[in-house]
């Protein structure tokens, strides 16, 4: 039934349950949510003739049966029963029987139901509007109102209300809805990144929307948010640096005490000073500026794995925000940065031609597997004041989609231990994603257990793991 929309409050948003109506002629109740009666999940359809089968096929002008016959939409038996119900007809019989019953009656909605529908539509709209107003008036923030009814919020805030705000900031995920409602009202909108929390993490809603009467007022608010974001980032960075400084100072003091103590049986005093295993607070400006706006930080954990033969291996687990994976350090005597160079015709003066600060492409491993002995470091070699720079290979994956960085272990990159007792590091890292970049770090914690897991992860980033993931991604399996 048509509604007098001019005299009734708007239907949406709906905040109350449907009203019910029980007909005097049958027991099952109808429901109404302001848009007509519903019975058994179906509404009354006044244009039912389009669903009835043709009594005669459509013919051409010549009187022959047309090849193309109109398509009659199919409806379930429950729908046909509901249409009979609305018309005051019996619901017994097959779909064909129900159709013929409706065709024969050729009537509309039963008068009792038509009257009830009109009354219930009006009653529902009024009750819903009253409940909506009560709920609206109980809301205490712009955010609540903007999410409950964007159009009403904007009209009251900028058009019909008493507020003189030139622009407002709404912390909400309903930005698209607000933008769509604002445009017809002549308002201007712009989204912006939310500032970090004081602890350096992003808020749960990390994009805000600014709404204003004109572009200038919106731009002014955006600048306010940007300046506040800058202040918070500075505070977070200063707090982080202070925590790092204190932790690093404690590490240096401990290393100093250890170096002053008599060496243990079977160890060299110098080795005690160079306990490089542990966690490092990493700074990598390029990574942080490109991917670190959500408060994430770079990290590096170095692990020492000792063999029964006395030889050892050095691993590192890194998290560079956009990339994560494993460093595996190379035996200096097999090409490490501070290793004594081999005597060749091109290197008679004994100087190493390799740039110890950079990364290089190792052609020898381009088509062959890497010799695992390359990573086995003899007991006579340790990070020290005379062996500061170490080369490493790395394997890893992008953190977004988790794609393994194939052939990354063909790169030789470098890490140099600096500062007191090697507790500071400076490195060069290269990947297809970042190019060659630098990073620095300060040791903040001693080594923790977990080298077995690191060794296992090295295998997880192998070429075979890449192929397995690729085939699984495309449904091929193995």
Image (cartoon, rainbow, N blue to C red):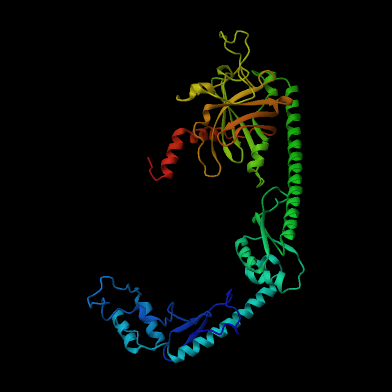
From the top left corner, tell me how far across and down residue 1 is, in percent. 49, 85
Residue positioned most to the front? 62
| Camera-nearest residue between 279 and 119 | 119
**Where on the picture, by quarter, is residue 72?**
bottom left
From the top left corner, tell me how far across and down residue 403 is, in percent. 50, 40
Horizontal side of 62 relative to 270 (left or right) equals left
User: Considering only vertical position in the picture, is 263 above or below 243?
Assistant: above
| Camera-nearest residue between 405 and 275 | 405
Horizontal side of 93 relative to 173 (left or right) equals left
Q: Say which quadrant the C terminus sits in.
A: top left
**Where on the picture, by quarter, is residue 423?**
top right
Residue at the spot x=47%, y=87% of the render? Answer: 22
Residue at the spot x=76%, y=50% of the render? Answer: 227
**Where on the picture, by quarter, is residue 465?**
top left
From the top left corner, tell me how far across and down residue 102 is, in percent. 34, 85
From the top left corner, tell me how far across and down residue 48 is, in percent. 38, 81
Q: How many marks?
A: 0
User: Considering only vertical position in the picture, is 434 above or below 473?
Assistant: above
Residue at the spot x=25%, y=70% of the render? Answer: 67
| Camera-nearest residue between 227 and 441 | 227
Residue at the spot x=72%, y=62% of the render? Answer: 214
| Camera-nearest residue between 311 and 393 | 393
């Amino acid at each position: 039934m048509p509604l007098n929309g001019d005299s009734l409050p708007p239907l949406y948003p709906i905040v109350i349950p449907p009203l019910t109506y029980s007909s005097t002629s049958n027991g099952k109740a109808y429901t109404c949510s302001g848009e007509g009666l519903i019975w058994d999940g179906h509404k009354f359809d006044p244009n039912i003739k389009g669903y009835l089968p043709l009594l005669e096929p459509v013919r051409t002008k010549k009187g022959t049966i047309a090849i193309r016959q109109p398509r009659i939409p199919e409806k379930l038996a429950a729908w046909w029963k509901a249409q009979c119900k609305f018309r005051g007809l019996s619901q017994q019989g097959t779909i064909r029987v129900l159709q013929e019953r409706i065709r024969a009656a050729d009537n509309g909605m039963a008068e009792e139901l038509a009257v009830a529908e009109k009354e219930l539509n009006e009653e529902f709209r009024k009750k819903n509007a009253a409940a909506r107003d009560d709920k609206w008036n109980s809301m205490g923030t712009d955010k609540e109102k903007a999410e409950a009814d964007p159009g009403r919020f904007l009209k009251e805030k900028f058009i019909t209300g008493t507020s003189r705000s030139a622009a407002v900031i709404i912390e909400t995920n309903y930005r698209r809805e607000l933008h769509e409602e604002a445009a017809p009202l002549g308002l201007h909108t712009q989204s912006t990144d939310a500032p970090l929390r004081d602890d350096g993490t992003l808020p749960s809603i990390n994009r805000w929307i600014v709404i204003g009467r004109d572009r200038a007022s919106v731009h002014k608010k955006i600048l306010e948010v940007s300046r506040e974001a800058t202040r918070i980032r500075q505070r977070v960075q200063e707090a982080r640096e202070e925590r790092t400084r204190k932790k690093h100072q404690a590490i240096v003091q401990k290393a100093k005490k250890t170096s002053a103590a008599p060496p243990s049986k079977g160890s060299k005093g110098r080795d005690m000073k160079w306990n490089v295993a542990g966690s490092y607070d990493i700074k990598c400006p390029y990574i942080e500026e490109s991917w670190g706006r959500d408060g994430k930080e770079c990290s590096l954990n170095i692990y020492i794995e000792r063999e029964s033969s006395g030889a050892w291996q050095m691993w590192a687990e890194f998290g560079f925000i956009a990339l994560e994976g494993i460093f595996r350090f190379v035996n200096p005597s097999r090409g490490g940065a501070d290793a004594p160079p081999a005597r060749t015709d091109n290197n008679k003066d004994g100087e190493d031609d390799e740039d110890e600060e950079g990364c290089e492409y190792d052609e020898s491993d381009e088509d062959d597997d890497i010799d695992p002995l390359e990573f086995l470091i003899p007991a006579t070699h340790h990070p020290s004041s005379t062996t500061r720079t170490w080369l490493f290979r790395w394997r890893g994956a992008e953190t977004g989609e988790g794609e393994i960085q194939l052939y990354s272990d063909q790169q030789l990159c470098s890490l140099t231990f600096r500062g007191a007792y090697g507790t500071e590091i400076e490195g060069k890292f290269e990947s297809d994603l970042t190019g060659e970049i630098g990073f620095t770090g300060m040791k903040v914690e001693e080594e923790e257990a977990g080298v077995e897991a690191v060794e296992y992860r090295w295998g997880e980033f192998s070429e075979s793991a890449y192929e397995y993931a690729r085939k699984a991604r495309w449904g091929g399996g193995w």
